[in-house]
Amino acid sequence: MTEKFSLKDHLFNENSIGDLAAEYSARVSGFDKNTFANEVMSGLASRELLARLEWIADCVEKRLSQDFLAMADQLESAMPPPLDPLLCDDDFGRFIHAVPGILAVRHGLESHFDRALDLLHAATQRFSMEFYIRPFLNHRPVETMARLSQWAEDENYHVRRLVSEGTRPKLPWAKKIDLDPLDPLPMLDALHADPTRYVTRSVANHLNDIAKIVPDAVIASLVKWRDSGLQAEKELDWMTRHALRTLIKQGHPGAMDLLGFSAECVQKVLLSIKPGPVRIGETLQFECTIVAHEPSNLLVDYVVHFHRPDGRTGRKVYKLKQGKTGAKNTLELSKIHPLKGNASTFTLHPGPHRIEIQVNGAIFAEADFELEK
């Protein structure tokens, strides 16, 4: 039987802790790498991923100066070289290098604000400080936003990405920030034309977060960026699709219009489900034919409404096809949708269900089916 993958053990293990120990012992006087590594490893097994980071920081902290200004100097001296400045994408860094961010929050937030931000500036070039900038945004938002505005023009793309990623209103795993979700938009204006995909992906994800709160602001920003012509057309097209993915699922008219999809082009949609019982653990099979008034670009999703024991329904949107009509202005599609009975994130229950076909943001056909055990 294949052993289940453990992210926390992949990130924090004897090898990675040994690397961290070697970095500190080589540059911090009196730092014993063996006792440090042994202490860290003795406390890892009982802790989850983020708690492991705090524990590693505990073990580093006790071996450094307790004066934060001196501690910050030690932390910077122990940092490995900056991440490859030429890679330009997906170079997130190693989780073991989150320690300076944790200690910057613990000891610099209240009394050494500027020095702590300097430490985050250096640290994010080794591992993203997106979690650790957020307490500063909550504690002193005006001063932190002013510093981030400067960093939006930094020569290092990891620093520029932090400006966007750290201010996201719905950053996964991260603590909530109190900022108005529209406050970072001027910085996103500056970052949208960045030459690195690592930065522009963050900007697009940031807009997708805002779309869940103030969708019209996202549409307005994307229109403004398109009109400015500062970003390459192909990259901005990718950013637009990525930023609008939530609104596309919702069939938001402004998003559809911006992407060039019109529901008015659709004449009718014919939907049929394969006859016979539909059971948990098997598949739902369906076919649909989309008939348009004229040659058209089509964005086709399907929506499944799931039954719940308490009578509520759960709604989930799935991608089906983006394409063009063919002969006789039609597009014929089929799908086999798995109905997994052992999914870890979604539990199926027997009862009445419904499938809908959404074309260019509008529902055109639906069919009911009974899900059985």
Image (cartoon, rainbow, N blue to C red):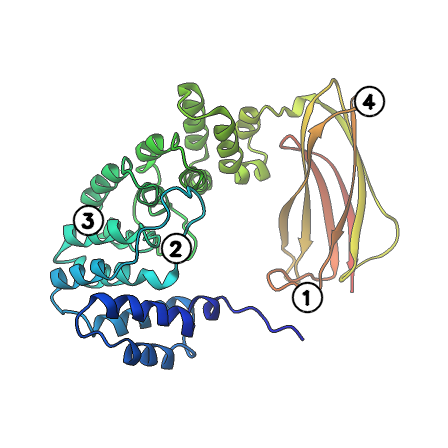
Q: Quadrant of the N terminus?
A: bottom right
Real-space Cα separation, disc 4 to disc 2, in angstroms: 50 Å
Q: Position of residue 198 (x, y in %)?
A: 43, 42
Q: Which residue is mark 3?
A: 140
| Front: mark 4 or 1 | 4
Q: Position of residue 16 (x, y in %)?
A: 40, 68
| Front: mark 1 or 2 | 2
Real-space Cα separation, disc 3 to disc 1, in angstroms: 46 Å
Type of the residue with mark 1: Asn
Q: Earlier in the sequence, mark 3 or mark 1?
A: 3
Which residue appears at 47% of the width and 71% of the height? 9
The reply to whether dot 1 and dot 2 touch (C-beta < 8 Å) is no
Residue 327: mark: 4
Q: Position of residue 307 (x, y in %)?
A: 68, 56
Type of the residue with mark 3: Arg
| Front: mark 4 or 2 | 2
Type of the residue with mark 2: Gly
Residue 89: in sight, yes or no? yes
Above-or-below relation of 306 to 359: below
Q: Earlier in the sequence, mark 4 or mark 2?
A: 2
Real-space Cα separation, disc 4 to disc 1, in angstroms: 41 Å
Q: Which residue is mark 1?
A: 342
Q: Which residue is mark 2?
A: 93
Q: Secondary structure at mark 1?
A: loop
Residue 51: in sight, yes or no? no
Real-space Cα separation, disc 3 to disc 2, in angstroms: 27 Å
Q: Earlier in the sequence, mark 4 or mark 1?
A: 4
